[in-house]
Image (cartoon, rainbow, N blue to C red):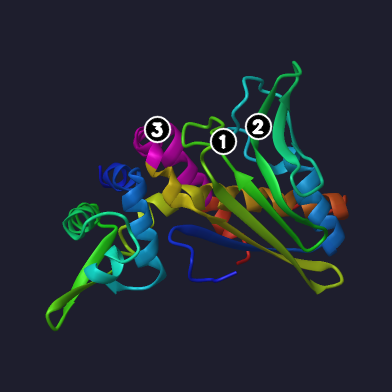
Amino acid sequence: MDAAVKPVSVRKSVTVNAPIAHVFRTFTERQNDWWPRAHHIGKCEQFTATLEPRTGGRWFERGDDGSECDWGRVLVWQPPTRVVLQWSIGADWRYDPALKTEVDVRFVAEAQERTRVDLEHRGLEHYGDQAEAMRNIFDSPGAWAETLTIMAGAAENKPS
Amino acid sequence: MAAQAQLAALGDPTRRTIFERIARKPMSVVDVAAGLSVSRPAVSQHLRVLTQAALVRHTTQGTRNVYQINARGVEALRAYVDALWSRALADFKAVAEASYQPKRRSK
């Protein structure tokens, strides 16, 4: 993949002190336990984020009442080294199948019990179709400034 | 605010295509127009909108303008998604490590 063909993307790395297989499973099977609770699209407070473990699988959340909301699709499934997800969540936290952004996650074993996770979320320019919803995010102190404040704290103990 | 203007500018598919081409490598108006089914004046107009939205900028090289991505301008858009993933990955790390070594609390 050409590294240059990424007009607007976000890249993040985090090093986890655990073996690669465990880290991959935590990412793909236990999103529920680490995904920021405020950021999801269903109506239920309690929900289960689920990845179907195969290329072409669904990525969705299921609320306690059984309702389901799609997040996207699994584009690449290569355990335990890589997973690429199509993220079709709009700026208003609604599913939009036409919105094609990609989350590319690579897992690298740096030691037996240390794994680096490189994440790239690309195609963000496609949010241009959702300017109005995005404006609400930028302008809303609750959603945006608070996230930044939390982030500032989290970033301090986050290995890069 | 600026971020909204940027997103609105990228909401047009042709402009997005132009933006993506420039992001790959800096190029002149002629190069941008090549292969697109829009007229050169239309391309120039799109470039004006992208420039006003601080998504691209140009430098003059001899008799032609060379357009390139305005890295600082796209930062506001990136920042939101960046913050989201920072938080998610920090929590992800904590969960992965805590579940591997249950005795150790990461947070």
Residue B74 appears in view: no
Q: Amino acid at mark 1?
A: Pro
Q: Taking A157 as reference, is B14 above or below it?
A: above
Nearer to me, A65 or B13? B13
The residue positioned 79% from the left and 68% from the top of the image is A114
Which residue does the numbered mark 2 point to in the structure image?
A: A70
The residue positioned 75% from the left and 50% from the top of the image is A27
Which residue does the numbered mark 3 point to in the structure image?
A: A133
Nearer to me, B82 or A74? A74
The residue positioned 48% from the left and 66% from the top of the image is A5
Closer to viewer: mark 1 or mark 2: 1
Calculate the distance from the C-alpha at mark 2 to the C-alpha at mark 3.
19 Å
Which contiguous range is marked in magenta? A129-151
Figure label count: 3
Calculate the distance from the C-alpha at mark 1 to the C-alpha at mark 3.
16 Å
User: In terms of image quadrants, where is residue B63?
Assistant: bottom left
Q: Amino acid at mark 3?
A: Ala
| Image mark for residue A97 | 1
A63 left or right of A119 in image: right
Q: Chain of mark 2?
A: A
**How many residues crowd around disc 1 within 10 Å: few (fewer than 14), some, or many (20 or more)?**
some
Per the picture, the main secondary structure of the magenta-coloured stretch is helix
Give residue B77's position: percent from left, percent from top: 39, 50
Return the disc, 2 or 3, that comes first in the chain's sequence.
2
Q: Taking B89 as reference, is A68 above or below it?
A: above
